[in-house]
Image: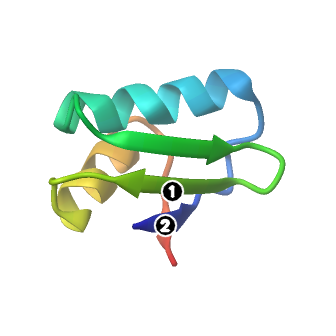
């Protein structure tokens, strides 16, 4: 699944996004790109679970 996260602007933000996703699925594969605000996630968790975790962490995503 792919997301655009408007307020992921730096490496610290990317680490926060990664932590939020790993809390849901520790085995998830995550690629973050702060300059484009793009996140790619490969996970067994549902998209709703990931969106909820990101919202809770303060990084509201837009699914793409």
Q: Tell me residue 6's x, y (percent).
A: 68, 56
Q: Going 33% across and 38% down the picture, which residue do you hit? A: 21
Display colour scheme: rainbow
- Which one is nearer the viewer's eye here, 38 or 6? 38
Query: Would residue 62 be found to the left or right of residue 13 on screen?
Result: left
* Mark nearer the N terminus (1 vs 2): 2
Q: Tell me residue 30's x, y (percent).
A: 46, 42
Q: Tell me residue 31's x, y (percent).
A: 55, 44
Q: Going 61% across and 32% down the picture, which residue do you hit? A: 14
Extreme residue toward the right, this view: 35
Q: Is the N terminus in the top left, top right, bottom left or bottom right quadrant?
A: bottom left
Q: Which residue is mark 2?
A: 2
Extreme residue toward the bottom, this view: 64
Decide: few, some or many residues near mark 1? Use Cα within 10 Å; few <14, some 14-19, many ≥20: some
Q: Going 32% across and 57% down the picture, which residue do you hit? A: 51
Query: Would residue 58 be found to the left or right of residue 45 on screen?
Result: right
Decide: few, some or many residues near mark 2? Use Cα within 10 Å; few <14, some 14-19, many ≥20: some
- Which one is nearer the viewer's eye here, 14 or 52? 14
Q: Tell me residue 54's x, y (percent).
A: 38, 46
User: How much space separates mark 1 and mark 2, taking CA atoms?
Assistant: 5 Å
Q: Are marks 1 and 2 in contact (CB under 8 Å)?
A: yes
Under circle 2, the secondary element is: strand
- Which one is nearer the viewer's eye here, 40 or 16? 40
Under circle 1, the secondary element is: strand
> Which label sits on residue 53?
none
Rendered position, 50 above or below 8:
below
Q: Which residue is mark 1?
A: 40
Q: Going 25% across and 52% down the picture, which residue do you hit? A: 43
Rendered position, 57 above or below 32:
above
Rendered position, 11 above or below 29:
above
């Amino acid at each position: 699944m792919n997301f655009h996260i408007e307020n992921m602007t730096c490496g610290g933000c990317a680490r926060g996004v990664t932590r939020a996703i790993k809390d849901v699925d520790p085995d998830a594969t995550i690629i973050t790109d702060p300059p484009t605000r793009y996140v790619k996630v490969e996970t067994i968790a549902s998209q709703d679970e990931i969106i909820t975790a990101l919202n809770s962490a303060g990084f509201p995503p837009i699914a793409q």
